[in-house]
Image (cartoon, rainbow, N blue to C red):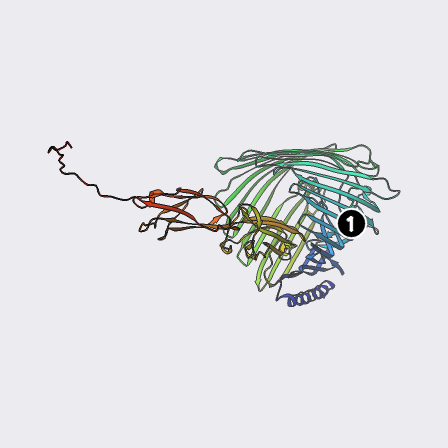
Amino acid sequence: MNLGCKICAACCHLALAAISTVAQQVATESAGAANVALQGYYSGQSSAYWTDITGVAADFRVFIPRAGLLRGSFQGYGREGALRLGDNYLELSGVRWQGRHWTFTGGDFRFSASMAPFPFYNVYYPELAARGFRIETSTRTRQIGVFFGQETILDGPRVPFRRSLPQRTTGAYLKQRIGSHLQVAARVLRLTETGDLPEQKEIYLLPNRRFPRLNTATVQSLYSATSNLRFFSEVSGSFPGAGAGGISVSWLTGAVWESRMLLARANYVSQTASYLPLYGYFLGDRRGPFGEIRFRPWKRMELSGSASRYENNLERRADALTARSTSMTAGAAFALPFRFNLSGQASAVRYSSSRPAEAGWFESDNRQLTTSLSRPIRRHTPRISFRELDLNTKFRAERQRTVEAEDIFQYKRLVLGGAARLQSIRAEERRHTVFVRGLAQVNLGRVSAHANVESGNDLVNRTVFATNTFSTTVVGISASLGSGWSFQAEAFRNRLIMDLNPESIFLLQNRGLALSGALGGYNQWSLYVRMIKQIQWGVALPASQLEKYAAERVPLTGSIEGVVYERGLNGVRPACAGVAIILDGTRVTVTDADGRFQFEDVAEGSHRVGLKHDELPAAYDPGPNAEVTVFVRSRRVARVDLEVFPLGRLQGRVKGPAGASVEGIVIRLTPTDRYTITEGDGAFTFHNLREGRYQVIVDQMSLPARARLTTEGAVQAVVDASNPPEGTLEFELSMETNEKPIRKVLELDLTGTTPPR
């Protein structure tokens, strides 16, 4: 058994034992998941060069109640008799302390060199990766972090590991959100060289980028003026140290407009060689403008264009490469009738460079034109594309033309595809070839497989003496084996055959030479295998946004306090005890004797606080602010005041003479639309009235027959719950008498005559 397999077996055993121990300790009250993978990458070629990488990659994620999210990773591989390490770290995040969330990371860590959200793509910001420690504390609007470690970069084929570089990073950063429109960030960074670079050091650092010791300070900001318009800016100062030059300033500024119809980006960058000289990255040392626009006047049309102009070696050092480039692109895309899609783009790049100790400039002027036409036809997606590339330098002019036809067929779980490309090159001579490729994918539930095949002639490296034919084959399979086990494998083979040019064979054989047509061959193959075991315990963790998951379950907390006031006739006053208050529809408390209430341990963020209507005492009505939204900050008290209307009543009586009916008389109350009717004794009552002034009116249409009021039919009344009236309202009725009339039939006067009627 080789060293790689021994290391793999030992690491796998240790990883499984550690994860099982953690799982047993916290399974009853936490949520967690882990993956343990045994993987290897093996490659060889006809020249007998071998790559043998075998190892284990294990990671786990555990949410511990009241503590936070614990994550860890171990990746160890044996390669050619040596141990290589991948990402190895232990991290505890979401720890709540002193009103902040804390994250502690030991081992490998990385984060983006851009601290504020970066809205452009023409400037590259790498990840700052190191092996050491990082501590970060955060609130809703602020993040503060410190870090220290040895810089690392990814290395290795297919199974990547981390290579340590002789550069130490030490620094701190601050990210702050100000309101809803502005984000600012600042970082101080110290880079220190700790040794010699590995072999082929030009891969890791350009000659003019080496600084044994460098201090930098950077400030970034992103201002969202509107939902469409954003401004980004960055200023950075670098100080190489005593005797190594003064402070150099780098800066970038730009704006973005983004709407449904128009997208426009523009920026200008000026970065010195000491901007961010991380080993393994080529950053800084550039200056120039960039602009891009995408315009969509109609739903079926999009126009685009971009332009840039850059130059480097701003310090004009004689030992550094000096380069200048200008590029322009213009494109259009159309959704045509009958489901046709047409797109095209034209681009031009002009590049010039001057190398140290070389006279003059090397210049090239390159242009490219591409078009593509496609249309879905049932289960097929055919596409035809054309490309023309003009490469022009002072040594050579070349034109490449390519026409390609492609079709993708999809039926349920099967995908088949193929393409043929006719390629021609015209330089000192004309060359033509056909390049073909095919693909297949199938998904059978637990098992999925894919294959890609490419074959053609290499026109670029073809000479008058030899022709090159190459073919590439990739086959892969993945399967779910059940019980948390899965398997993945992929095989790759690339063949390059160099044959003597037929014209050369004819010429040399005519000279009496017996020759073989095969000049040489190159056969490279690789195999990647990975066996994975997934382990879960407790509640299932989400597949993504684990930090948000932990923060919601271990939140930063504050408190909510307030008073419930009575809004009455004479202003406001504290309400009595027993008024129910509800928080976010779940937590309930009641007011004390002074009308005060309090909620402790409320998570940071927006919350709804209001009266619990179904438990509100009968003596109150909800006030105008019966429910409010309040924002709670960590370790702070949020103030909320609510109001209720105290309720009173009005009583009265309608009186009448003996024997008169005073029942059923309608009594109205204005300015409300309420009314009631009198009882048998003439009494009436209005309940649950808010404090205020009212008018009580007797509806005279409801009075009994021959009854009339002897008092006013409308009286003013005041409802004051804190000072109820001693008496009642009274109305009096009187009844008109109903005498029968006497009819005179015959009446004689003294004269004996009857008077006229």
Q: Residue furthest front?
A: 750
Judge left or right: residue 370 versus residue 696: right
The amino acid type, in three-letter code, at marker 1 is: Gly
Neighbour tally class for label 1: few under 14, some 14-19, many 20 plus, Cα within 10 Å: some
Judge left or right: residue 69 versus residue 406: right
Q: Position of residue 605 (x, y in %)?
A: 62, 50
Judge left or right: residue 26 versus residue 683: right
Please say whether residue 47 is visible from this viewpoint: no
What kind of element bears circle 1?
strand
Q: Residue furthest left?
A: 752
Q: Position of residue 172 (x, y in %)?
A: 76, 49
Q: Nearer the viewer, residue 274 or 487?
A: 274
Q: Nearer the viewer, residue 657 or 63?
A: 657
Image quadrant where residue 176 sits:
top right
Q: How many marks?
A: 1
Image quadrant where residue 296 sits:
top right
Q: Position of residue 633 (x, y in %)?
A: 65, 50
Residue holding disc 1: 171
Q: Position of residue 1 (x, y in %)?
A: 72, 66
Please say whether residue 310 is visible from this viewpoint: yes
Q: Residue at x 64, y 52 (%)?
A: 604
Judge left or right: residue 326 versus residue 170: left
Q: Quadrant for the C terminus, please.
A: top left
